[in-house]
Amino acid sequence: MAKTPFVTKEKVEEIAASYPTPFHLYDERGIRENVSNLKKAFSWNKGYKEYFAVKATPNPFLINILREYGCGCDCSSKTELMMSKTIGATGDDIMFSSNDTPIEEFKYCNDLGGIINLDDITHIEAVEKACGKLPKKMSCRYNPGGIFKISNDIMDNPGDAKYGMTTEQIYEAFRILKEKGVEEFGIHSFLCSNTVTNEYYPMLAKLLFELAADLKAKLGVHITFINLSGGIGIPYLPDQEPNDIFVIGEGVRKAYEEVLTPAGMDDVAIYTELGRYMLGPYGGLVTKAINEKHTHKEYIGVDACAVNLMRPAIYGAYHHITVLGKENEPSDNKYDVTGSLCENCDKFAIDRMLPKIEMGDYLFIHDAGAHGFSMGYNYNGKLKSAEILLKEDGSFRLIRRAETPKDYFSTFDCFDFYNDLISE
Ligand SMILES: *Cc1c(COP(=O)(O)O)cnc(C)c1O
């Protein structure tokens, strides 16, 4: 089975005439369709809101598309809060789900009116100190520990994860917060990443709904939202069955009606903080074959490297590759597709069967729209690529320019490094 890129070879050639490869390309049509379906799938819940996980793809142009559908921003750092502020997402449009948080970032978030989601019980004091007093609305992050299983498959290992409060701590935290005047409460939990199953969210929801009902019964707290966070995955492999967001939405509704409605809690809003699911499939890394090497293996060297997309290098993650214009040719050549870093893990594919690749061919690396560009770094003096939006009408727009050597040298304030270089 193959994956179909959202762009043709001809279109890539047209874009590359203005903006040289490598670049990240995003599909506006796909983004809009997907967010619109997500909203429909949860429309049964009056307060439903998606807070896009900014870290996945911190580009204001892309986030602004999601904003048109009522999405807020889930931030994890001051810089991400600043980006949200810049695009007009403040107040209840911000969820600050940070961890190991520097105390001044709580203040920055609070000044913007954002919702602070506490990763740890000790942060109650930190927020009080930073903000003078506690905000009226607060959220706590929960980690039940142990392992998280779906029908006997181990999905993930929350007991090993640094995030969130234990069961005992979250009861204690809610008690303290209530005593200190907090009026509205939220619960957040993120137990499994990249789940390609429709069962994760409904199971997580049931667990959090039961906790919420018990917290209300025992402590009399007013819980106004439950945040299912991220974790809905995408099929990176071509033969994987994608999630059905409507089945997921219905599964969460069923748990809601089983647990929250009988507990008299049918005013609770459902929040999500999806990143990967929102943009992952709607971004691709476009790169050109620039070198071939025939040694102990067959290598194709491309003009992108792990700096542009780290997932294969750090997790051995699979990203499907299409050789543009050769979609219908047989995949009868076995290649390692490599970048140029001085690191042997800098391979986009290992022993991958692909059509015969000629120098100058464009490769489309799929599913790079989330946790792609944003994880990039500057190792080996490599510069970050441009980001380009392919619009619904087929036109394209540069939404972040590529870095230049000047950007790379700009943090050496103590030298006039770059100007010396260019005046030579
Ligand atoms: C990373 C992250 C997300 C988004 O995760 P995805 O796997 O991209 O959906 C959401 N919330 C928090 C707190 C995160 O750290």
Image (cartoon, grey):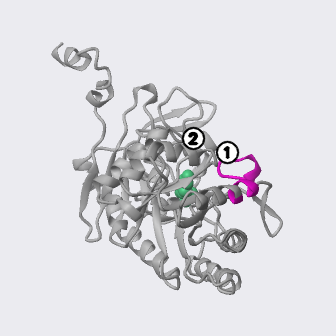
Residue 55, horizontal then vertical, whole percent: 46, 50
Specify the quarter for ligand 1: bottom right
Q: Residue furthest right?
A: 152
Q: Which residue is mark 2?
A: 100
* Secondary structure category for the residue under label 2: loop
Amino acid identity at mark 1: Lys
Residue 146, horizontal then vertical, whole percent: 80, 55
Quick check: marks 1 and 2 in contact, CB under 8 Å? yes
Amino acid identity at mark 2: Asp
Q: CA distance from mark 1 to mark 2?
A: 9 Å
Magenta-highlighted residues: 156-171
Residue 311 drawn above or below residue 397: above
Q: Residue furthest left?
A: 423
* Secondary structure category for the residue under label 1: loop
Q: How many callouts does the rendering have? A: 2
Which image quarter: residue 388? bottom left
Q: Earlier in the sequence, mark 1 or mark 2?
A: 2
Residue 335 visible in the picture: no
Q: Which residue is mark 1?
A: 162
Front one among 76 and 310? 76
